[in-house]
Image: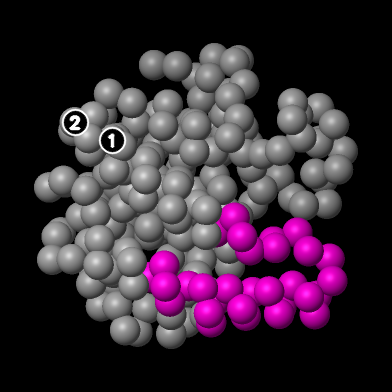
Amino acid sequence: MPNYKLTYFNMRGRAEIIRYIFAYLNIKYEDRRIEQADWPEIKSSVLFGKIPILEVDGVVLHQSLAIARYLVKNTDLAGKTEMEQCQVDAIVDTLDDFMSRFPWAEKNQDRKNQMFTDLLTHEAPHLLQDLDTYLGEKEWFIGNSVTWADFYWDICSTTLLALKSDLLDVHPRLVTLQKKVQALPAIANWIQQRPQTRL
């Protein structure tokens, strides 16, 4: 088994999908969490200047979704067929496209608040309706078993609900899917033991 070391801030953020996969696949790793105040000093030593990064036997990998795809490769979490794998990637990328529109690093608080409100009030409902339609009466987004697209939905929706608590009130099927992911024993155990952070 390779030696894994994950480096990210002390928050869920972009590293949480990697932590979910490690938890579900029962893979041991070092979860190195750094404080925001320490980041400027560390940043200069990180290639491309962004985290998370995952060190695999000393080889440094970057980009959270690329790391996630590497970890789920050759497992059912990726999807059981090439078609399913494409569908999984599409849902993940759809969610990530939306989450990436939030101005997380915006310094002007008034501008940041306005942009968050616009996205949550005007844009999110369209995305959620499309996701609801895509899920339909199925148990999981793709195929007949859980994939990392379902994990990513839980992670993104948890953050969205922290920002606007009534966002899923009209989408009970999406709430059910979120709860199903959180009820998976390995995920439930991780959620219980992880550091509690807002985002």
Quadrant in the picture for the N terminus:
top left
Which residue is at 74% across, 26% downward? 47
Q: Amino acid at mark 2?
A: Thr
5 or 126, which is in the foreground? 126
In the displayed structure, would residue 28 be above or below residue 179? above
Q: Which residue is mark 1?
A: 85
Residue 118 pos. (x, y %) = 61, 78
Q: Label 2 near label 1: C-beta < 8 Å?
A: yes
Residue 166 can be seen, yes or no: yes
Q: Secondary structure at mark 2?
A: loop
| Disc number placed over residue 81 in the picture, else none | 2
**Is residue 11 in the magenta section?**
no
Quadrant in the picture for the C terminus:
bottom right
Q: CA distance from mark 1 to mark 2?
A: 6 Å
Residue 90 pos. (x, y %) = 37, 45
Q: Amino acid at mark 1?
A: Gln
Q: Secondary structure at mark 1?
A: helix
Which residue is at 84% across, 71% downward? 108
Residue 164 pos. (x, y %) = 52, 80
110 or 176, which is in the foreground? 110
Magenta span: 99-128
Residue 49 pos. (x, y %) = 76, 35
Quarter of the figure with residue 69: top left
- Left or right of 111? Residue 21 is left
